[in-house]
Amino acid sequence: MNRLNLRSFTIFTIILISLGFITIIPESSKPENTKKENNFEEQIYDWTRTFAKVLQTTNEKHYKIPNAEKCMIAAINGFLSNTDPHSAFFPPKEYKDIMESTSGQFYGIGIVIDNTRNSKDKFLTVVDTVPDGPADSAGMQPFDKIIEVEGKKLDGLSTEEITALIKGERNTQVQVKVLREGEKDLLEFDITRDIVKQQNSLCFYLPQQHIYYLALSTFTQNAINQMQELLKKSKEKQYKGLIIDLRNNSGGLLNAVVDIAGMILDKNSLVVTTKNKFDKETGRYATTNDPIINNTLPIFILINNYTASAAEILAGALKIHSQELAKKPGRQKKLMVFIVGEKTFGKGSVQEVIPIGNNCGMKITTSLYFLAQDTPVQALGVEPDFFIKRSLPQTKQMEWLTEFYGRETTLQNHIKPNGQVDKNEENNIKKKTDKKTKTWSKRAKQLLATDNQLRAAINLINLLNVAQTCCPDKVKNREEAVSFLNQNFITDKKIKMEEVHI
């Protein structure tokens, strides 16, 4: 072997070991599809020789390599990030920060982020702020777009790397720059990191409609306890239905999803399985407790495109059990779960963080989630039974136009009937007194008051309740109920029209 080939082979071997490609497998335990594996090994061997040649030539010819380590980190990350959007390489600092964050030894600023972003995106969307958390107190708002952290632009950084930048030691400051709709200039916040006590759920009772509403922001042990407490309290009142809001819920602990599903489904009901690339089942998760909810109670689940991962598993599992498995003898025949809103994100993959050489780590996708009846979640998501698009609040410009030009009362010297109160003057007084910062629950209540998807779910519950009383034969099971409600409730699907010639 000449010097060039020996050097290339040495570099090739080092790269393979550092990436964890070399695994000694006993002959009896080798996977069946060795052809695919051999094809992968052949391609890697062929291109690693090319890569080794690039490294050697760069070393010999390049005028001045500024930072070889940085180049290698980018190259390895490039390989992993091209396998799928959720795989990534963590250099020493990021890997250390991520391991600390998973062990709980970190402090943050209290924001719920959009975990669905691509590393090529130049910003990170804040889906919500944690009530009374550091970011909330500093003035950050939902749908702010973070474009810089500590002066570092986010283009090319993974969500995990950005999260690692934001987190840090307690009582230290982090500088964040954001874009906000309606603001001409960038907003800059110096936020002090602290303990973030996240409220995982928000619950309201709607007395006029006799309906309970529960929003779950993420799945934790705390969310399990809050759900359990709500279902116990709900038994004290006669109510028509339960709305579970999973919009903007990007996931959380899988065991929390299984435990919450166990409050609704029969004991030993399958929630989800995991399968590896050989289509072999690697995990099976089923409920272990008896349900505590009234199984005749209709449950309407709100979803949107930010409903992802564990949240999709809960919505999908409840829908499938209600739709298919509940029809079998001995199952909950009267369980009715309906999905309202827009199709979910479709994040049905499992990632593992694996330590490798040079104090680095790698996150790779190792398996996929499958709901009951072998139903995949990945890239497909969960479809709603009732498609309702979210109508966002008016922009500040439209509110201004409506306030000053949109009605007769906005015209100067308009005529008022005798004894009529000027609503404009009344509203101005209210605005002056309402400038005080609202608590998170008050802000949520204000947003929900004009939430068209929530209103749709309430109307569907009321319509179903009327049908169960007046014409029970038309809604005696879930399939018939979905058909009846879609016939009598206008969703955002296209309306069929036939022209009548007159």
Image: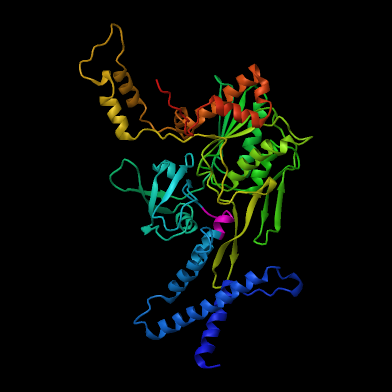
Q: Nearer the viewer, residue 251 or 27?
A: 27
Relative to 41, 264 lies left or right: right
Q: Nearer the viewer, residue 233 or 456?
A: 456
Quadrant of res 17: bottom right
Q: Looking at the figure, which quarter contains the N terminus?
A: bottom right
Q: Position of residue 42 (x, y in %)?
A: 58, 76
Q: Looking at the figure, which quarter contains the C terminus?
A: top left
Quadrant of res 219: top right
Q: Nearer the viewer, residue 250 or 499?
A: 499
Relative to 268, 371 lies left or right: left
Q: Residue furthest top?
A: 418
Whether residue 219 is visible, yes or no, is no
Q: Residue furthest front?
A: 502
Question: What residue is shown at x 61% (from left), y 19% (from top)?
Answer: 466
Colouring scheme applied when the structure was drawn: rainbow
Depicted 209 relative to depicted 437: above or below: above
Q: Position of residue 117 (x, y in %)?
A: 46, 52
Residue 103 is covered by the magenta coloring:
yes
Depicted 427 relative to depicted 217: above or below: above
Residue 176 is covered by the magenta coloring:
no
Question: What residue is shown at x 43% (from left), y 23% (from top)?
Answer: 500
Q: Position of residue 178 (x, y in %)?
A: 36, 48
Q: Position of residue 260 (x, y in %)?
A: 66, 40
The stretch of residues the image draws in magenta is: 99-106
